[in-house]
Image (cartoon, rainbow, N blue to C red):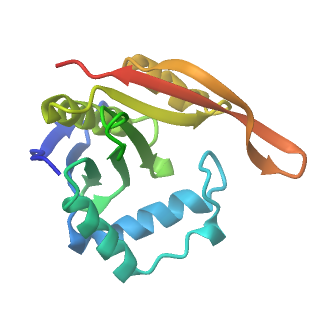
Amino acid sequence: MGQVPTVESTLPGGKRIVVRVARPEDAAGLLASTTAVFAELGNTVTEPDEFQVTEEQERAWIERKLNDPGGLLLVPEIDGAIIGSLSLDRAGRRRLAHTATLGVIVNREWRGKGVGTVLIDTALKWAAESGVIEKVCLSVFASNGRAIRLYERLGFAEEGRRPKGIKVGPDRYDDEVLMYRFVER
């Protein structure tokens, strides 16, 4: 992972946020945040019973991300508590290595308050400075209008859609919207 300076900012509501690279000692806090988001059964592909990760496994995953030059794992903190995460993973094949996939989660009580914006801005700056990543891609539930509006505001555009790409229940589906943004250098 390249160098990412810690970002300190004030959210529109006045709260101070710190965005930084995840460290192995963040395993418990990151695990708690991720588990809480998956438990909502909302706009994530992973269902709660599919996420059976121990603190040691989470710590090992963070260490792998720290040692991956094509990856990034950020955590946002407010008052010392981890309230989400952002991962950016560069494709492994040479012909795709100019692309990276973005994943963002923010705890429910902090959504719509600017956390996602600070996280994504930080990741896009890192991608631009990488000198390798040219395109950042993501996918989002079509029903997640709040996230789609955020991504569009940050310069992402829809590049495709997978009709009924996500099965949300018996005979219930949601389209998966594929979005991208080219990195500005």
Name of the residue lying farthest toward the front? 94
Relative horizontal placement of residue 17, taking residue 141 as reference (left or right):
left
Residue 152, image x and y in percent?
46, 19
Quadrant of image for the C terminus: top left
Residue 13, image x and y in percent?
32, 34
Residue 132, image x and y in percent?
20, 33
Q: Considering depth in this image, is 9 or 84 the residue closer to the camera?
A: 84
- Residue that appears at 41% across and 18% down: 153
Q: Considering depth in this image, is 153 or 123 the residue closer to the camera?
A: 123
- Residue that appears at 32% across and 35% down: 120
Residue 28 seen in the figure: no
Q: Quadrant of residue 91?
A: top left
- Residue that appears at 34% across and 26% down: 135
Q: Considering depth in this image, is 181 or 99 the residue closer to the camera?
A: 99
Q: Quadrant of residue 100?
A: top left
- Residue that appears at 35% across and 82% down: 56
Q: Quadrant of residue 82?
A: bottom left
